[in-house]
Amino acid sequence: MSNSSGVSPIETSSPPSRRCRSSCPFPPDDRRYNDPVADAKVGIVYIDVDWHRWVGGERTDEPEVGAVWDLTEHPEHPDSPVVREGFDSADEAVAWARERSPLVLVRLASNEDEFYSAGERQATRELAEHGGTDLRPYPAWPPQDYVARPS
């Protein structure tokens, strides 16, 4: 799934805020759009579980679970189009994401075979409202064989 530019946000220039209880390396983020939007769920939240921490065969010190709330299509958020958060578990990240967006995509790997829809709206490979024609849905989160790692 991607935004209007066709790019799925994984990396952003701003650091994620600290939400995890374990040792997260990120300072608190005081951005004004980090809280749910009053009476509205907007944007798309992408949740990456573990795979995003591996760079060049080395594990980085990023949190186990990273979430990116993409608000680039929302007119009320032009100054802060992307919010990043770190979590100890996928369940915590999904709960946070569901408070903010109807579209939640959990990615267990970098290929689409490991993407899962966790929001109230079924995530598809492309968005119809952006001219997408591949409307095959992602399977529901969590997958049957998913085992969460203890925090």
Image: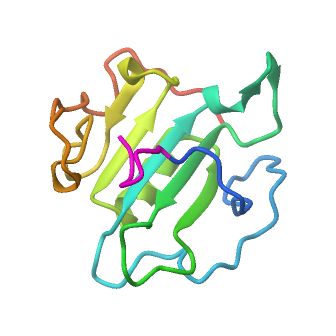
Residue at 28% of width from left, 82% of height from top? 39
The stretch in magenta equals: 1-8
Q: Is residue 65 magenta?
A: no
Residue at 27% of width from left, 59% of height from top? 102
Horizontal arrangement in the rendering, residue 45 relative to residue 62 (left or right): left
Quarter of the image where the N terminus is located: top left
Residue at 46% of width from left, 80% of height from top? 77
Q: Is residue 119 above or below residue 64?
A: below
Residue 52 screen position, x and y as percent: 64, 32
Residue 90 screen position, x and y as percent: 51, 40
Q: In this view, does 132 lie above or below 28?
A: above
Horizontal arrangement in the rendering, residue 123 relative to residue 81 (left or right): left
Quarter of the image where the C terminus is located: top right
Horizontal arrangement in the rendering, residue 84 relative to residue 92 (left or right): right
Q: Is the magenta stretch mostly helix, strand or loop?
A: loop
Residue at 62% of width from left, 26% of height from top? 51
Residue 139 screen position, x and y as percent: 24, 27
